[in-house]
Amino acid sequence: MKRYLILEDGTVFPGEGFGSSIITTGQLVISNNRTGIEQSVTDPNAEGQIIAFTIPSVGSSGINRDFYESINSQCKGVVIGSSSISTVDNSVSFEDWITSLRIPGIKNVDIRALSRHIAEHGEMKASIMDTHDEHAIDQIKALVLPPDLVKRVSTRQSYPNPNMGRKIVIVDLGLKYSILRQLSYRDCNSVIVNYNSTAKEIENLHPDGIIYSNGPGNPQDLPNVIKSIQVLQKKYPILGIGLGNLLIALANDCQIEKLTTPHHESSLAVKEVASGKIDFVNHNHSYTLDQKYIGSSDFIVTNICVADGTIEGIRHEYLPIMGVLFEPEAAPGPTDGYYVFDEFIDLIDSVKQQEGAGSQWN
Amino acid sequence: MAKEIIDGQTMTRALTRITYEIIERNKGIEDLVLVGIKTRGVFVAHRIESRLKQLENISIPVAELDITPYRDDKTHEEKDISNVKTQPLDIDINNKHIILTDDVLYTGRTIRAAMDALMSAGRPKKISLAVLVDRGHRELPIRADFVGKNIPTSQKEKIKVSMKEIDGEDKIEIE
């Protein structure tokens, strides 16, 4: 069935439809992920997004049921050049899998031309449709993407991820299950709460540390979360990942900006400023911290992207707050970033030790 | 048989964490001086210094300290301080916050000797201690402020720290 990918600026890419046959609209994101396609599609960050995979033969690395990042997929559509069946196991084919998730897809699209177009003109809205007349283009131009992406992916009710270790409260802004996997691996006794939980509600859980998770959308749409960070950061160690990191920055008078070349790639080099160590980690963010404000703030830059110098990690100078913009839990991508979780646990322990030592420090 | 318990990557991470903690607990690092106890403590000091420079863009002084004349297992004549020819430190430590660094904290006797050496060179405002490994079994009331890794040991065991600058690779072994 012939279908069309129509961009906000009127550009049309013809292709062949697969998966669900509904008409879909969302933010078009170019993803350079080579493996872990199932992780990208089920990632709650993909809420409201149409993902275009630039690799050929999507699905050749298999669809691994152990790697889903949420129960229901939030992705609004997928755009691919070609797909193939798995060459590593006999799992379900990519197209059948997308069909079973009832996600609309479009294949045989000139994905390289699309990728170049987006690189030149920036991220934009897009639609997968059956026609490409004037009316369709007007429709997508007029469409306003909903700002409540986090509300739609955040858990409505708190739930525990029990274990016997340190108690972590995770504020779910679009939590990937791999964050929980990493915490479980470190025996953390965690509770996952709704993004709108008040500072008081979180305090009542008596956490050892708080994690603000990754998530979709613009952090400026979440003023309540910023307010609760401002209260909680004086009392508890905090780790921000992705969107969580941006919110921490906004809570401390830093500004954010939209990246001209957004980072959506499973393996991009990041340098640890202190030691010069290079880590390859998964990136999935369109915003970054504004360099102009970081100098006068209380943050020090701990990680930067090697390719374009973007700030990728910060740490507060005297409060136990740290944040990374990349995704340390990988999923998909190399596992170099796992150390961020160890570092956060070290931070929690060091805060506890200092409290025990009383007035020993300064 | 020696068994590697900490690899190069973990050692790098521990040193980075110590650096972050030094920044967090000292609002401003301007009056800091790093003093490394010879031999491997000096390398620990230099590595912390380079991290601080990368992060805060401030270069803080690093000094090397030879504690041999101050050891408590010397005979009386050897110990005579007046025989010490060179000044133990080549920088002014008066009114500075000194961060003393060493590779392993064990009985605490080395640190006591180091403090003696420092006191004979001036009057620092404060002395803190940063070590890569704390293996326990203290014989003096001394405690580290910044610890890379706590490694519980028995007194029969030996901890061997290797550092790239002198041993060719970073690792910590137990035997």
Image (cartoon, coloured by chain):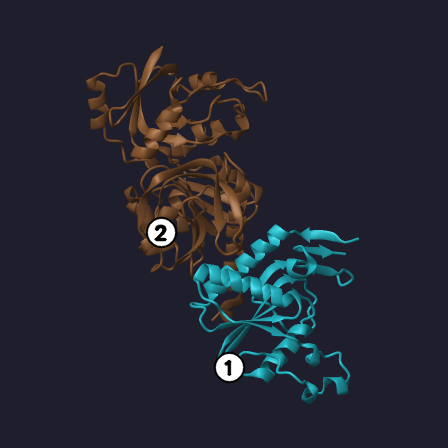
As drawn, the chain in cyan is B
Q: Is residue A243 visible?
A: yes
Disc 2 to disc 1: CB gap under 8 Å: no
Q: Chain of mark 2?
A: A
- Residue B107 vs residue A197, the one in the foreground: B107
Q: Chain of mark 1?
A: B
In the rendered image, which quarter contains the N terminus of chain A?
A: top left
Q: Position of residue A334 (x, y in %)?
A: 54, 38
Say which residue label 1 marks: B94
Say which residue label 2 marks: A249
Tag 2: Cα neighbours inside 10 Å, few (<14), some, or many (≥20)?
A: many
Residue at the spot 29% in from the left edge and 46% down from the top edge? A223
Q: As drawn, is A122 to the left or to the right of A155?
A: left
- Residue B84 vs residue A23, the one in the foreground: B84
- Residue A335 vs residue A278, the one in the foreground: A278
Q: Is residue A361 above or below residue A258?
A: below
User: Considering the numbered disc 1 on the image, is that residue within a helix, a strand or a loop?
Assistant: loop
Q: Quadrant of residue A195?
A: top left
Q: Position of residue B60 (x, y in %)?
A: 49, 69
Q: Position of residue A359 (x, y in %)?
A: 49, 70
